[in-house]
Each structure stands twice: as structure tokens, then as C-alpha cells.
Image (cartoon, rainbow, N blue to C red):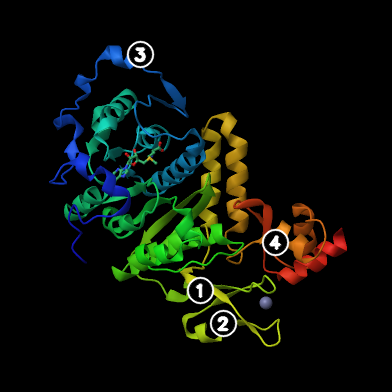
Amino acid sequence: MQPDRKLGESSGVAENWLMKIGADGEQADARSAGTRSSEIRPSEIQQTEIRQEGQAQFELGPAFFRPQAQTARELGLLAAAVQRAETGQLRVLETMAGCGIRGVRYGLEAGADFVWSNDADPDVLPTLEANLARNLDPDRYRVSRGGALQLLSRCFGAQDYYDLVDIDAFGNPSEFVGASLGAVKIGGLIYLTGSDGRSLTGHAPENALKTYGFFPRSNPSCQEQSLRFLIGSLWHAAATRGFGIEPVFSYFGIQTYRVMVRLRPRTQSSSAYKFLGHCHGCGEYQTIGWRKLSRAHCKNHEPPLPLTLSGPLWLGALHDAKFVRKMLHGVSRLPQARHSVLTELLQTFEAEADMPPYLFPLGEIGKRGQMDPPKRDRLIAALQTAGYRASPTHLSAQAIKTDASLERCIELSQGSS
Ligand SMILES: C[S@@+](CC[C@H](N)C(=O)[O-])C[C@H]1O[C@@H](n2cnc3c(N)ncnc32)[C@H](O)[C@@H]1O
Ligand SMILES: [Zn+2]
């Protein structure tokens, strides 16, 4: 294993916080770093607006918080609850905690035995500590201030492995990918977030190449492709360490990409780690293995047109359908108001899990067929009647996934309109 980079050599997300963290890069425990809960005066707590999400009562203080990310938080806790039920234990490392809402909810609603909530920003520490203290018994949590990379490396160094490592990063999370693998148990879960859509979707491919080592090209599936790039980078980082990963679920929402993967004890075959080819001429896709790169052409044209290639990326299942079904059972334990959105989302995950690694927007079907875009559910039914696999996709309400060609989708849409 490569030695971890030293503080100050870090790039990207962590950089802004390095000055605040301190030159030694050590984690400062809230209880020993001048941010003891006893220093948060009760009068301050009373004056702070207390919010509620799920069973958690929390204050925001100066922390970054997006109410719309509730679905992403709840997907994480539904998966964590299944993990807890199946393995009998749940220790969570929350590396970028903000106000600590995730840590609190893992504790209260996923039954986490222990949560370590960390954030690099010293200004959010009192809020983080207050929220954990408000909701969990003191022996069930720990709060610290420091860089996520240092925290992950520290856990690796101490052989302190977690059942769930949560990295809710802004922007490009590539620097945490390798380190996250060192802090998770074999069989444990990594929940990784990235929001650098420009790089991931192929609008700044050179940036993606520099920071992640893959080259995305823009195409109508570029959001799904972005999720697959994040899974692929975890797959490759795991393989370099002799491990494997498999996706648990993948979620694109509010312009943010989130993947949860499980660490496997052995490197898997590289058959799902290859390239996606898109033909700008006819809109069809092909999956291309490493040995066929020089033959990546679309034969729908004479002479055949070269494909635009993106990769390498993960072209296996986007979700673990069986695990997602177990997550669905947990929805009823969340507040009633959340049931329909989570149920619909998880059912869509299940339906799209093993579909081909791309989607067809209804608008593109309409444009290429010179007609109005077809109705989604009617086209899915027509495809299934014709013997194809077809499903909606959580990536867009105006797209479908199917093993039929785009040409066939156009024919069936023309027939059913
Ligand atoms: C997206 S917010 C976290 C939101 C929170 N998880 C939630 O669900 O409300 C990202 C947090 O990461 C912290 N952060 C940014 N870079 C960091 C780093 N390198 N190490 C640790 N924390 C970092 C920021 O201070 C911020 O609180
Ligand atoms: Zn073509």
C-alpha cells in the first residue's frame, strides 16, 4: 500500500480546511480540543432553532445543510439498518458530518452501536457535539475535528475498521477513494458522494483524467455514466489493494452523485470494468472491452462510424437488487410522509438494477423518430409485450432503460402513438 500523502500535499476538497485544521493534521477530539459540550451554554442551545428530521432533533449552527438531501441520508440509513440486522453490528465513521444529522440518524434509526462524527471545519464543532449529545448516549458516539483523509488514514493505521464509512464530500471526492478502503471492514459499506458534475459528465474530461484516471465523454446517459465512473474508481482502487467491491445502490439527485459499495475480500474479474461507446450518428450504445477498443465502430453506417468512448468505468449492476428489496422493508419504520418517495425510488432501483448500462431519453426517441416524445409507461409496456426488458430509471422521469435498440424504441413508439 502506498504511504498516504502528507498534509499540505492534499488537493481539492480538503485544501480549504487545511489552515483551519492545524499544521500537524491531527484529529482534535471535541472533548479535548476546547469544544467540550460543557462549553456550549444552555442559553445558546435554547436560543437555537431546533429542527427535526426523522427521529433526530438538531440545530444547524454554521453547518452546511441541505434539507433536499434527506432522501440521500435516508437511503444511507436504510442500508445501514439492513447491515446492522444482517451482521449484528454497526459502527459508523462519518467523515464529513456538518451538523451531524447523518450520524445522529444512523444512531437513532439504523441502530448504530457507535458513531464517530468528524468535520474539518472548527466552526461547526460545537454544533456537531451538541447534536450528538442531544440525541445519543455519550458512550455511543465520538466527535472530532480534522481532515477526512487524515481520519481515514488514522483508522487504517490503528486497524480500526468500520461497518459503514460515510464520505459526504463537496465536489470531487477522488482523493478519498483509496483511503476509504483502508477504514472499512471487509463486508462493510462505503457511502461516497461527489458533486463535480462538469468533470464526471464529460464536460471537463481532462480534469477527470487528472484526478480520477478515467476519461468521460458527454452523451445522453452522462449522469448514469457519472455514477458508474465513481463505482469504477472504487473498483480499481480496491483491485490495487487485492480487494473487490460491489455496488449496493447508486443515486443521482439534486445534481449530486452518490454510490454505496460493499468491500469484498478478493479482486473480482475485470469483465465489468471497461468502456461505453456511443454513436452520435444513430444514438445507439455499445459496451467495449479493452481488447476491442480499436474496433469500436457503429456498423449501422456505411462506412461504419467510430464510437465516442468513455471509460474505463463500471458496467455491471447499478444496484444490488436483493439488498435494495431489504431496504424497502425498512421504509415503513420511517415517518409516513417519506414512504411514497422512498418506496417509489427503491422500486425503481430494483427494476433498473440489471438493465444495460445506459438510458434512452424520451425526447431523443421523439426527435430521432420525428414525432412527439412517447409516453414513458406506454413505451415500456410496448417493449415488454414485444419481448424486451424495459424499466423506468431514477435518473430521469423522462427516460427509459431497455435492452432493445434505440431504433426499436422509435419503431414501437411510432406504432403505439
Ligand atoms: C456536504 S457537507 C456535509 C453535510 C452533512 N453530511 C449532512 O448530511 O447534512 C460537507 C462537510 O464536509 C466538511 N469538509 C469539507 N472538506 C472536508 C475534509 N477534507 N475533511 C473533513 N471534512 C470536510 C465541511 O465542513 C462540511 O461540513
Ligand atoms: Zn450509429
Closer to viewer: mark 2 or mark 4? 2
- Residue at mark 1: 275
The residue lying at 24 percent from left, 31 percent from top is 139
In the rendered image, residue 193, in percent from the top left (x then y), is placed at 42, 50
Q: Classify residue 104 as left or right of residue 331.
A: left
Quadrant that contains the C terminus = bottom right
Q: Which label's residue is closer to the chain start, 1 or 3?
A: 3
Q: Residues within 10 Å of mark 1 (few under 14, many from 20)?
A: many
> Which corner quadrant of the image does residue 337 belong to?
top right
Q: CA distance from mark 2 to mark 1?
A: 10 Å
- Residue at mark 4: 390
In the image, residue 236 sits, relative to residue 322, either above or below, namely below
- Dot 4 falls on a residue whose secondary structure is strand
Question: Looking at the image, can residue 186 be seen?
Answer: no
As drawn, the label of residue 47 is: 3
- Residue at mark 2: 296
Q: Is the residue indicated by label 4 positioned so its CB lies within 8 Å of ligand 2?
A: no
- Dot 1 falls on a residue whose secondary structure is strand
Q: Which label's residue is closer to the chain start, 1 or 4?
A: 1
